[in-house]
Image: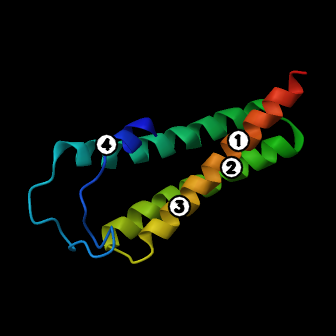
């Protein structure tokens, strides 16, 4: 996530609003880092969810497994929407980010409270 955040993509595909559909100049190297960093991070979060689900019990096991599954579906949906140049690609991506970040925060709180 840090890699995707540090390396800003070129304006393209109508984002930010008003940007050309395709860049007029060759892509800069940092765009490639951004485009590779995001999927790697989301697939790593999927792996963390699956791995964690096996170690948890009860509702946390179910919540973690469902988050991992839903996150994987949204990762694939984001990639497919990006390839189709769909209008709602950013919305799907934000849903993916919200899904995983909510789980990270809730799981962190759960782990902190369970150690007390």
Q: How crowded is mark 3: few (under 14 residues within 10 Å), some or many (20 or more)?
A: few
Q: Do the residues labelled 1 and 4 touch (CB within 8 Å)?
A: no
Earlier residue among tags 3 and 1: 3
Q: How far apart are marks 4 and 2 (CA)?
A: 23 Å
Query: Residue 100: where, in percent of width, then height?
Result: 62, 49
Q: Do the residues labelled 1 and 2 touch (CB within 8 Å)?
A: yes
Q: Distance between the residues labelled 2 and 3?
A: 12 Å
Earlier residue among tags 3 and 4: 4
Residue denoted by label 3: 94
Residue placed most toward the observer, 25 or 71: 25
Asked which secondary structure carries label 1, the reply is helix
- Side of 80 relative to 45 (left or right): left
Task: Give the numbered dot on residue 102.
Answer: 2
- Name the residue at 29% across, 73% down: 14
The answer to which quarter of the image holds residue 115 is: top right
Query: Residue 87: where, in percent of width, then height?
Result: 40, 78
Q: How crowded is mark 4: few (under 14 residues within 10 Å), some or many (20 or more)?
A: some
Earlier residue among tags 1 and 4: 4
Asked which secondary structure carries label 3, the reply is helix
């Amino acid at each position: 996530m840090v890699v995707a955040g540090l390396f800003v993509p070129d304006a393209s595909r109508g984002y930010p609003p008003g940007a050309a559909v395709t860049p007029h100049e060759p892509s800069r190297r940092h765009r490639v880092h951004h485009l590779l960093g995001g999927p790697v991070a989301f697939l790593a979060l999927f792996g963390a969810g699956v791995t964690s689900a096996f170690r948890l019990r009860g509702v946390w096991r179910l919540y973690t497994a469902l988050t991992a599954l839903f996150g994987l579906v949204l990762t694939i949906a984001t990639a497919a929407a990006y390839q189709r140049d769909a209008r709602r690609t950013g919305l799907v991506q934000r849903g993916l980010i919200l899904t995983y970040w909510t789980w990270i925060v809730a799981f962190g709180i759960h782990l902190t409270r369970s150690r007390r």
